[in-house]
Every structure is written in C-alpha cells, then in structure tokens.
Image (cartoon, rainbow, N blue to C red):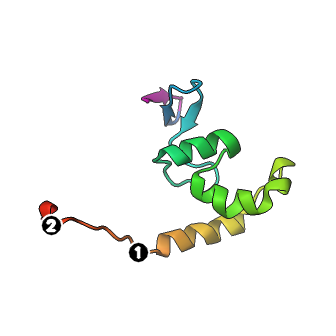
Amino acid sequence: MQKSIVHNKNEIDLFIVDDIGDKIVPLFCDLCEFIMNNHEDFESYRRFKSCAECEMCFVQPNIKKWKTGWRPSEKDINKYKDKIRGQSLNLFLSEEDN
C-alpha cells in the first residue's frame, strides 16, 4: 500500500493507493467524510464510493435505488454523523500494556 500526497492550487489531498488494480482510494469517505482506515473501507469504496459503515447504513438497505443513482440526503448523512460522534470509544488494554 502506498500513500500519495497531491498538491492542488488551494488544497492538499492525501490518497491511499492500493496495489490491487492501482485504483486510487481517498483518505475520507465521500458520504460521511470520516477517515477510511481499514481494508473493508477500501473494498467498499471500490464498490460503492463509500466506507464500509456507510455501505451497511445507506447502500445495502437501498441497493436497488443506489445502483440507479440514489444517495442519502444531507440531512440523513448529518444525522448519521451526529450518531457516530455521540458514541463512546472503548479501548481495551492488556495487562502487558499497563
């Protein structure tokens, strides 16, 4: 896996380039704008231009509509983002890490 930084006039974009098919995957999901950070996200982006979580939340329940161009409303996406931001983060450390 290779990371590339692309400089445009007014912004810098970071892309993850996976060796499989040389398809460029952006660092952030097109829908929720959260960082894509695992293999499932990259695979989901290749299929649906979304992270794995957005695929489960928006794409799969609406797969027929999705294939014809439907996308969730900005209101629905913002509601989803608020829900994600409101979730607590649980970290588990082993005794060896202490």
Numbered mark located on residue 53 in the image:
none
Q: Quadrant of residue 48?
A: top right
Magenta: main secondary structure: strand
Q: CA distance from mark 1 to mark 2?
A: 22 Å
Find numbered disc 2 in the image and state the secondary structure of the residue it sits on.
helix
Name which residue type carries label 2: Glu
User: With respect to residue 61, does 8 lie above or below?
Assistant: above
Eye-nearest disc, 1 or 2: 2
User: Relative to the observer, which residue lies in front, 10 or 38?
Assistant: 38
Name which residue type carries label 1: Ser
Residue shown at 46% from the left, 74% from the top: 87
Q: Which residue is mark 2?
A: 95
**Residue 57 screen position, x and y as percent:** 66, 64
The answer to which of marks 1 and 2 sits earlier in the sequence is 1
**Residue 39 screen position, x and y as percent:** 50, 43
The N terminus, quarter of image: top left
Q: Quadrant of residue 20?
A: top right
- For the record, the magenta segment spans 1-9
Q: Is residue 36 left or right of residue 58?
A: left
The C terminus, quarter of image: bottom left
User: Relative to the observer, which residue lies in front, 14 or 16?
Assistant: 16
Residue shown at 57% from the left, 30% from the top: 24
Residue shown at 15% from the left, 61% from the top: 97
Q: Which residue is mark 1?
A: 88
User: Relative to the observer, which residue lies in front, 70 or 9?
Assistant: 70
Mark 1 Cα-neighbour bin, 10 Å: few <14, some 14–19, many ≥20: few
Find numbered disc 1 in the image and state the secondary structure of the residue it sits on.
loop
- Is 62 within the magenta? no
**Residue 55 screen position, x and y as percent:** 65, 55
